[in-house]
Amino acid sequence: MAQSVQIPGTQENAKIANVIGVGALAFFFSIIYLWIFWYRINKEMAAYGQAKGTDECGTSPGKSLLAVTLGALIIVPALISFFRTHKRLVATEKLAGVEPTNGWVSLILYLVFSPAWLAYMQSGLNAVWEKQGVAPAIAETSTPAPAVDTAPAAEEQA
């Protein structure tokens, strides 16, 4: 299950997702899940870039989604979106101070087994959100326990 966290400096949420789950969902529900995943990660990166005052992390997740849906009919827009989204991921990782994902590993995973490629990209984003030390977006509803007085009584010390 994914943990929802707030992106620092924005009102947007990001998901720290289980990379095995991402790979499994991509394997079993490949096209539909790719579209959902693609929009979500591009939206998260764009929000993070805006919070940092840069547009190198992307500006329009809708265009990225359009490129991998309707643009996939002509192939080239989808390939360009895959390449540019990886560049955005690397830019996001650099802004966060995280070691960037390797482009060659990403390319090989894309060509050999694309669900593993999506999981690899999610692992890079997970590192960004974990590095930020962001708190969960959903506040806990439990009430705090009352304070307990741990000071020993004066009579017991005598």
Image: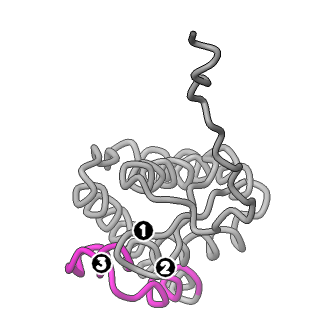
Going 51% across and 86% down the picture, which residue do you hit?
A: 71
Instruction: Name the amino acid, label 3.
Output: Ala
What main secondary structure does the magenta stretch of the protein show? helix
Residue 62 in picture, x, y percent from top left: 49, 89
Disc 2 versus disc 1: distance between alpha carbons? Answer: 23 Å
Check the image and name the residue furthest to the top.
Answer: 158
| Horizontal arrangement in the rendering, residue 104 relative to residue 136 (left or right) | left
Disc 2 versus disc 3: distance between alpha carbons? Answer: 10 Å
* Magenta residue span: 47-69
Disc 3 versus disc 1: distance between alpha carbons? Answer: 23 Å
**Residue 107 showing in the rendered view:** no
Going 57% across and 22% down the picture, which residue do you hit?
A: 154
| Pointer 2 residue | 12
Say what secondary structure mark 3 lies in.
helix
Rendered image: mark on residue 82: 1
Query: Mark 3 or mark 1, which is nearer to you?
Result: 3
Going 68% across and 54% down the picture, which residue do you hit?
A: 144
Quadrant of residue 77 within the rendered picture: bottom left
| Horizontal arrangement in the rendering, residue 75 relative to residue 50 (left or right) | right
Crowd band around label 2 with a 10 angstrom C-alpha radius: few (<14), some (14–19), many (20+)? some
N-terminal label among 2 and 3: 2
Instruction: Name the amino acid, label 2.
Output: Glu
In the rendered image, the vertical position of residue 10 relative to residue 15, given as above or below: below
Residue 98 in picture, x, y percent from top left: 29, 47
| Pointer 3 residue | 51
Going 58% across and 46% down the picture, which residue do you hit?
A: 116
**Residue 9 showing in the rendered view:** yes
